[in-house]
Image (cartoon, grey):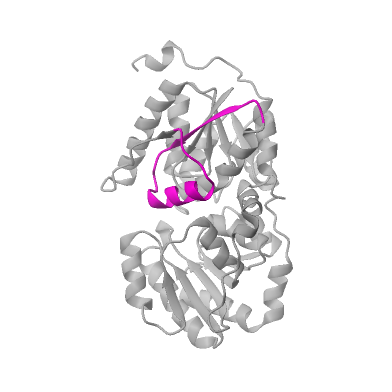
Amino acid sequence: MRVAILAGTRPEVVKLAPVQAALAVTDVETLWISTEQQGALNGQALDTFGITPDVRLEPPAPERTLGGRFAQIMDRLDQTIGRLEPDLVLVQGDTSTTAAGAMAAFARRVPVGHIEGGLRTFDRTQPFPEEGWRCVVGQLADLHFAPTDAAARNLLRAGVAQHRIHTTGNTGIDAVRLAGDRATPLPLTSGLRRVLVTVHRRENWGPELEQVLAALVSIRNNVADIEIVFVAHANPALRERVDTVLRGQSRIRIVDPLDYLGFLSHLKSATLILSDSGGVQEEAPVLGVPVLVLRDTTERAEAVEAGVARLVGAQTYRIVAAATGLLIHEAERMEMVRAISPFGDGYASQRIAGVIAGWRAERPSGGAQIRAAV
């Protein structure tokens, strides 16, 4: 059996690399197709995990709109899937590559496996466009690999047949486990406790970003023994505003986008993280770092329910109150450190590989139907 693995962003590479490694010890042949959706960050992650794509597609044009880039990715994947004729296409998460890949495979009548299936906020505007993309894939996939029981229940609510759903854990935890000692804690600056910050979601651009930046300055003013490290995003508009507000501020440091191991090293040395990232909500609890989620909703409600994360949104007063409270009251922070991560034991990839190795398509793929005009 030939399985095409589609990835184009750093999170996809991080979460699919353990799956490729697990499939390598089975009789399944894998083909890694890189859509180059995220350019340099995608390349960094491929290098980290020693992956050389079997196919590299032309990157989508940066000047195109979200829909235009999606269309370019889908068209190139359609041609590639048609040429390679895999038995199964694997996609991960909720990116444009994920949705475009699932649609291209479906149009070619090639079965789709969705890793990290079933995540939902039930609000298509948050996060945008990710919530829409993963709902689309949830309707098209033949195999759904749910990271948690809650994700599996979401799929059942959406009408997915029970026999198509496999609860496996999250492969992001596998990646943290496999990284192991390759990522060592970064030394602290002058003994200051480190508060790590990442912001990149579209719903946090504009006024919301201003609220977050104002909160960081207030937190710095409220707590004397901390250093805030802001991991900048590659988006030029975001970076420019972050530099304008935070550059030159004492005990606030801006760092360029980090590769996966570099980010884990920062995370391992952090006392607290403020982030709107979905992956960080999974990674930080495994490393014992409490997360304040800079969003009003999360598709990873299990982290909040387990006590390892708190939703604080992007309002200045809420961020300042939550962060200052945890940084001043160590017992309260330690309650979050001691909580158990709900996202798996680090062996989700082996479960996924086992399912795929024993799976067979229910119907033939391809055929004249894919070439017929509508």
Q: Residue at x 35, y 59 (%)?
A: 235
Residue occupying the far left of the picture: 63
Report if residue 34 is visible in the image: yes
Q: How many marks?
A: 0
Residue 331, compared with residue 157, is above or below; it is below
Q: Where, by quadrant of the figure, is residue 360 drawn?
A: top right
Is residue 7 inside the magenta stretch? no
Q: Where, by quadrant of the figure, is residue 2 drawn?
A: top right
Residue 311 image offset from top left, x and y in percent = 57, 65
Q: Quadrant of the N terminus?
A: top right
Residue 371, compared with residue 135, is above or below; it is above
Q: Residue at x 61, y 27 (%)?
A: 28
Closest to the observer: 331 or 35? Answer: 35
Closest to the observer: 271 or 125? Answer: 271
Is residue 40 inside the magenta stretch? yes
Q: Residue at x 62, y 46 (%)?
A: 171
Q: Where, by quadrant of the figure, is residue 208 drawn?
A: bottom left
Q: Quadrant of the C terminus?
A: top left
Left or right: 191 as drawn, with respect to 37: right
Residue 166 image offset from top left, x and y in percent = 68, 36
Residue occupying the far top of the picture: 368
Closest to the observer: 329 or 82? Answer: 82
Residue 193 image offset from top left, x and y in percent = 58, 79
Residue 99 image offset from top left, x and y in percent = 45, 38
What range is drawn magenta here? Answer: 26-54
Report if residue 311 is visible in the image: no
Left or right: 33 as drawn, with respect to 171: left
Q: Residue at x 57, y 46 (%)?
A: 15
Closest to the observer: 167 or 19? Answer: 19
